[in-house]
Image (cartoon, grey):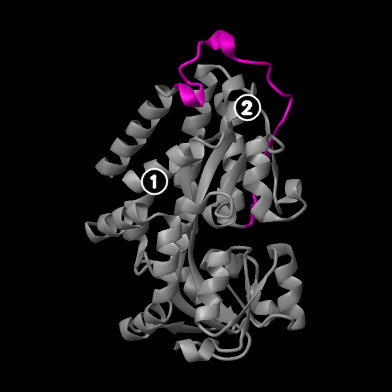
Amino acid sequence: MKTRRWLTTALFAALLGTTLLGLGKPAAAAGPYKDEYKLSTVLGEAFPWGWGAKRWAELVDEKTQGRIKIKVYPGASLVSGDQTKEFTALRQGVIDMAVGSTINWSPQVKELNLFALPFLMPDQRALEALTQGRVGKKLFDTLAERDVVPLAWGENGFREISNSKHPIHTPKDLVGLKIRVVGSPLFLATFNALGANPTQMSWADALPAMATGAVDGQENPLAVFNAAKLHTVGQKYLTLWGYVADPLIFAVNKTVWNSWTPQDRQLVLEAAQQAAREEIARARAGITAEDDSLLKEIAANGVEIVHLTPAERDAFRQATAGVYKEWADKIGADLVKQAEEDIGKR
């Protein structure tokens, strides 16, 4: 906890002193405030992700005494449902704010593919070692160079795989299965390496596709699986393999950020950090060794849950090792090496 508090303080201090983010400008430099700021997110408030966006909006309204009013637009509706276009829209000012997924932003920011390297992070502590350490700071610096002001890390969770055909224990069990994936080349490469048939589509299109059998399966965090009631669209077999994690980023368009007074920027930052902490707690609820209530709820809906042995999980890691190596070079060998070192020290 002391390390996290130190990192939060350090992040704030860095933001406070960075003219790139506009925090060093005097209050007189602030521009006119909008009547309403548009905040984009992919999932609605029934999911931890969407709940976190709504919570951020509430806290900003409260802390700024109504000077900054935010409306949340779920379903990536500000980009016609295409979540992979969200970062570009945020950067261009079509969107004012966002709680976005590193997966969805990775087509525009290649370094964010780090979290989608198959089997890089074995557990939550490994994820925290990245987001709350020097890797997380580097990634925030990278976003700041692209006219986006990142304020806090949230979590969508580790992504597990489900399907309507049979239990998945080995890479062979994935051969030929049509698996819905987001529009990321790295995800396509990973599932192709496993012999699956990855099918790229938005989340809005995924549910009817599963219901009709147009696709056999999907991969998402457990909180998403449960909230979306995927057991009702044929997803009867769920394997816990935690092959990648899906961090979220609370961010603001740079021009919008610079239009606010330094005092209001600080309040928006504090609100983002608080909302992120609360969102992470929701995303992790019921899926730990101490509290597995969410897993029990999923199983009670008739879903067969497979817990891989270390040897079984390692077989998937070996099957995707080539993808890992190829994409580590694309992401940046130094960044990946740093991530591996920090995970090793956790």
What residue is at 37 percent from the left and 84 percent from the top?
315
25 part of magenta stretch:
yes
Identity of the amino acid at label 1? Gly
Q: Where in the figure is residue 40, as x and y percent of width and height?
A: 66, 44
Q: Which mark is residue 136?
A: 1
213 part of magenta stretch:
no
- Secondary structure of the residue carrying numbered label 1: helix
Within-10-Å neighbours for mark 2: few <14, some 14–19, many 20+:
many
User: The C terminus lies in which quarter of the figure?
Assistant: bottom left
**Relative to 335, residue 14 above or below:** above
Span of residues in magenta: 19-46
User: Looking at this view, is 253 or 167 the one in front?
Assistant: 253
In the image, farthest residue toward the top: 28
Residue placed under numbered mark 2 in the picture: 256
Q: Where in the figure is residue 72, as x and y percent of width and height?
A: 68, 42
Q: Where in the figure is residue 139, as x and y percent of width and height?
A: 43, 45
The quadrant holding residue 95 is top right
